[in-house]
Image: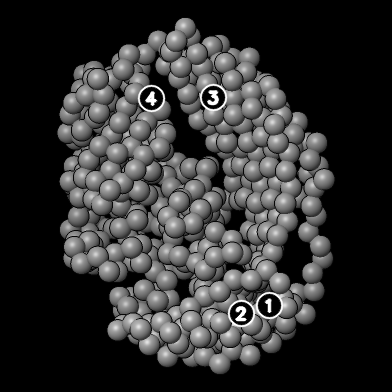
Amino acid sequence: MEFKIPIRNNKKLKEQLERYISQVDADYSDIRYEKMLTTSLTYNGKELSAVESNAADGYVIRVLKKGGFASISVTRPEDIKKAIGEAIENAKILARESENKIRLTFPHVVEDEVSLALDEDPREISLDEKLAVVTHYNDLVLKSKDVQTTLMNYKEVYRDKYFVSSQGSYIHEPLITTGINSRIIAKRAALVQTGRVSIGSSDGFFKLRNRDERFLKKAQIVSRLLDAEPVKGGTYNVVLDPDMAGVFVHEAFGHFNEADLIEHNPSLLDKMKIGSKLGPDMLDIVDDPTLKGQIGHYIYDDEGVAAKPTTLMEKGVLKGHLHSMKTAASFKEELTGHTVAEDYRYAPLVRMGCIYIKPKDKTFNELLQLAGNGLYICECKGGQTSGENFTFGAQYAYLIQEGVLGPMVRDINLMGNLFTSIKSIIGISNNLELSEAGGCGKGQINIKSCFGGPHILIKDALIGGV
């Protein structure tokens, strides 16, 4: 069974949400109603292991009262009146017990109905057709050399969001993302290697069609990894592909620009002051949720703030932070429209939308020549950060030998310190690629966060290996 979106009387719903807000005795309040529909298809090897469709909805109410800011979520309209009372009491308690009273920077009042612009609306494509697309890619990979099994998942998420604030804003913005994520496992004798491939978009199902080359290329790479030698640990000049560059800028830099993470950390707050020289003159970093078609695309965040391109770094100098209404007031900086919730169950957090390094003037071959001897590192497969330090695994890499690509190597871990590594960027290419797979696990899961970049060259990077 596949869920269809019912026709909704938006005017009636708007009036209903405004009535709820009118019952709130507070300095500020807002309510977000959201209906979410998800469809998922999963292959585990040759077996279709799951076909799921789910529908759910709910409300998130936020209240500012005497300097206390509280939120509460409910799923039934009949519980809203009681929830409003609890939110007000919680805000009063927070105001009474906290030395720091919360202030908010308010956005411009707006009334807007946002339309989805889709090339092949996924909701109008049958479940059988979606299954046929996923089955085709899964069969294609399973027939590839050395591939033993797969884990392939189609995921479609539709969020129909309505927002009303006591300031007078009303926003209706639907969002839809579709994607296919695959894990490819190859085996020869006792050696096993894995690879990942993801395709997806926020502007229609068409991006999932005719992508055989993407899946076949990754299957070939995983097979070749069975012949590759493990990398030798040490210090290398490294060229990061756009995927690795994107993960680097997201994890090692972007989170330190989220104002709620550094607001109460004096050490990081001092290092991430506006005007601090953190990188080379060639380095510009932007977060832009307004890029159409990207996984991280949206027009308004979940506080009713219009999203906008935000320059985080320009010529190596820190120029901006990502903000909520609360942190913008605390930092005395402008709103950026970067406060997003996982879904109807949560109050929003400060999140990246689509963060990337701006391309510059080098070609890929010029970066290889500049590296001399080192590693060309491709496609992140996970990692972690601990304060200023990070460790990222890569799916594979190639040795760079006298400016030319050499043999493939495996088992790569890129390690370093954020501030040292950013200063060590010595080359940026003239291409730009943004990820087709979103995701960030800060506090909540956010599928609307993506990243990307050009190729970048970092000198003297620490690589873990044998």
Q: Amino acid at mark 4?
A: Tyr
Name the spot of residue 303 as percent of width and height, x first: 52, 73
Q: How dense is the environment of label 1, judged by Cα within 10 Å: few (below 14), some, or many (20 and up)?
A: few
Secondary structure found at label 1: helix
Q: Amino acid at mark 3?
A: Ile
Observer-side mark, 3 or 1, equals: 1
Name the spot of residue 399 as percent of width and height, x first: 28, 20
User: Mark 2 highlights which residue?
Assistant: 83
Task: State whether residue 134 appears in this view.
Answer: no
Cα distance between the residues tagged 3 and 1: 46 Å
Q: Are marks 4 and 3 in contact (CB under 8 Å)?
A: no
Q: Residue at x 20, y 67 (%)?
A: 266
Check the image and report above or below for 420 versus 223. below
Q: How dense is the environment of label 4, judged by Cα within 10 Å: few (below 14), some, or many (20 and up)?
A: many
Q: Residue at x 43, y 84 (%)?
A: 93
User: Mark 1 highlights which residue?
Assistant: 79
Q: Residue at x 37, y 31 (%)?
A: 394
Answer with left or right where residue 435 lies relative to residue 135.
left
Q: Amino acid at mark 1?
A: Asp
Observer-side mark, 1 or 4, equals: 1
Q: Are marks 1 and 2 in contact (CB under 8 Å)?
A: yes
User: Mark 3 highlights which residue?
Assistant: 184
Check the image and report above or below for 211 versus 34. above
Q: Of marks 4 and 3, which one's residue comes earlier in the chain?
A: 3
